[in-house]
Image (tube, helix red, strand yellow):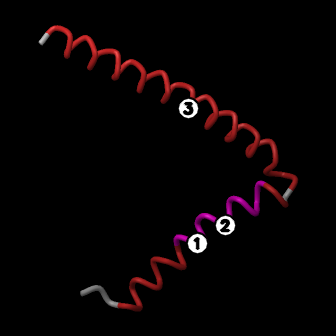
Amino acid sequence: MANPISSLFKLVLGLVLIALPVYLVLEVGFFRPWGIAALDLIKGGIVLFVIFIGLVFLLLGFSDLKG
């Protein structure tokens, strides 16, 4: 069984590691261009992810037709 203090520490650390970058990107003007670039990267990654999923389904379909 996990130690409750250890689990709570991990939970708080996870929340800090999520909240701190979001705060820096939204509230601190120095990091705003970085936030815009990061969002552009994520948007491009989503497009590539969808394309690769489509490719996997295409290959699965060809494999089923062959078999």
- Is residue 29 covered in magenta? no
Q: Disc 2 and disc 1: Cα gap in Å?
A: 6 Å
Viewer-proximal residue among 35 and 45: 45
Q: Residue furthest right?
A: 29
Q: Disc 2 and disc 3: Cα gap in Å?
A: 22 Å
Pointer 3 residue: 45
For badge 2, the amino acid type reads Ala
Residue located at (61% from left, 72% from top) = 16
Q: Give me the disc on residue 59.
A: none
Instruction: Tell me if mark 2 has few (under 14), some (14-19) or many (20+) residues whose alpha carbon lies within 10 angstroms of its own.
Output: few
Residue located at (69% from left, 34% from top) = 40
Given contact means CB atoms under 8 Å apart, are the residues at marks 1 and 3 in contact?
A: no
Quarter placement of the N terminus:
bottom left
Q: Quadrant of residue 45?
A: top right
Q: Quadrant of residue 58?
A: top left
Q: Residue 48: give x, y in percent of width and height.
A: 52, 25
For badge 1, the amino acid type reads Leu
- Is residue 24 covered in magenta? yes
Pointer 2 residue: 19
Residue located at (81% from left, 56% from top) = 26
In the rendered image, the vertical position of residue 55 relative to residue 46, given as above or below: above
Pointer 1 residue: 15
For badge 3, the amino acid type reads Gly
Q: Main secondary structure of the magenta part?
A: helix
Q: Quadrant of residue 39?
A: top right
Element marked by disc 1: helix
Q: Which residues are magenta?
A: 14-25
Given contact means CB atoms under 8 Å apart, are the residues at marks 2 and 1 in contact?
A: yes
Instruction: Tell me if mark 1 has few (under 14), some (14-19) or many (20+) residues whose alpha carbon lies within 10 angstroms of its own.
Output: few
Given contact means CB atoms under 8 Å apart, are the residues at marks 2 and 3 in contact?
A: no
